[in-house]
Image (cartoon, coloured by chain):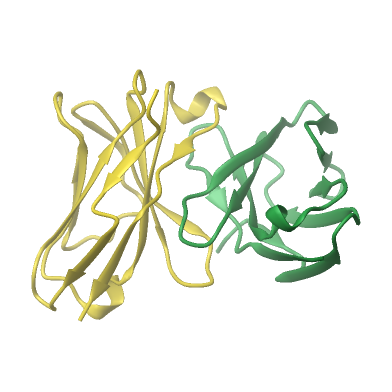
Amino acid sequence: GESVGLHLPTLSVQEGDNSIINCAYSNSASDYFIWYKQESGKGPQFIIDIRSNMDKRQGQRVTVLLNKTVKHLSLQIAATQPGDSAVYFCAENQAGTALIFGKGTTLSVSS
Amino acid sequence: NAGVMQNPRHLVRRRGQEARLRCSPMKGHSHVYWYRQLPEEGLKFMVYLQKENIIDESGMPKERFSAEFPKEGPSILRIQQVVRGDSAAYFCASSPTGRNSDTEAFFGQGTRLTVV
């Protein structure tokens, strides 16, 4: 079965709110994690990554948090915009294996 | 620098026909990965290739599916004798180094295969 999953299939927020998308993984050997954004009809787009020797990493309007104790990964999007509406996937990479994707969370941003 | 290019974007095949999906990696990338995505699902790994070599095909169905990445030209995912269950979006990704190096992979826009 899959080792990466997301807590909620959908998330609806108002424009300007902060969004938090969660992901749980089961394999403690995973050492690299990526968040991807996929818009309808397009391929996954890299958002941000984090390695297992870190617990937080910030990008432009996005922050990824990694809690290895409970095997939890989250993506925080600040001041969510309508253009952020998409499906978000977390993925994990274990050394020597393929990138494994979860099922995704659909983020809907209303104005 | 063009991104990962996949063609065709949409492909319709009748049951029993062959489907050939092409992927040109980003310039300078020698590692290619193929994934399949069913509606409302995540991406499932199929195969990982380097030039002229299949590194990992653990996600490939045992029959009808094959992949290659020749020295010259794009990577090809071939599906023989397609069935309706093969209908999906097929994505290709490329990276400059292998997955053991913890590097991001860049995805193409996908080929949407419909089997009628």
Which residue corresponds to the image point at 23% horizontal and 60% vertical from the top-left? B62
**Residue lying at 68% horizontally and 34% vertically, measured from the top left:** A49
Q: Which chain is yellow?
A: B
- Whether residue A30 appears in this view of the structure is no
Q: Which residue is at the front of the view, A16 or B75? A: A16
Q: In the image, is B112 to the left or to the right of A57?
A: left
Chain A: what color? green
Q: Position of residue B59 (x, y in %)?
A: 36, 54
Q: Position of residue A2 (x, y in %)?
A: 58, 60
**Residue B93 picture location, percent across and down:** 41, 40
Quadrant in the picture for the C terminus of chain B: bottom left
User: Horizontal placement of B69 versus A76: left or right?
Assistant: left
| Quarter assignment of residue B69 | top left
Instruction: Identify the image quadrant of the N terminus of chain B.
Output: top left
- Which residue shows up at 87% across the image and 48% down it? A79
Q: Is residue A25 above or below residue B92?
A: below
Front in this rendered view, residue A21 or B2: B2
Percent coordinates x, y for residue A109 in the rendering: 77, 64
The residue furthest right is A17
Q: Which quadrant would residue B107 be assigned to in this image? A: top left
Compared across the picture, whether A5 is left or right of B77 comes to right
For image coordinates 62% across by 44% down, the residue present is: A92
Above/below status of B58 relative to A60: below
Left/right placement of residue B23 relative to residue B41 reads left
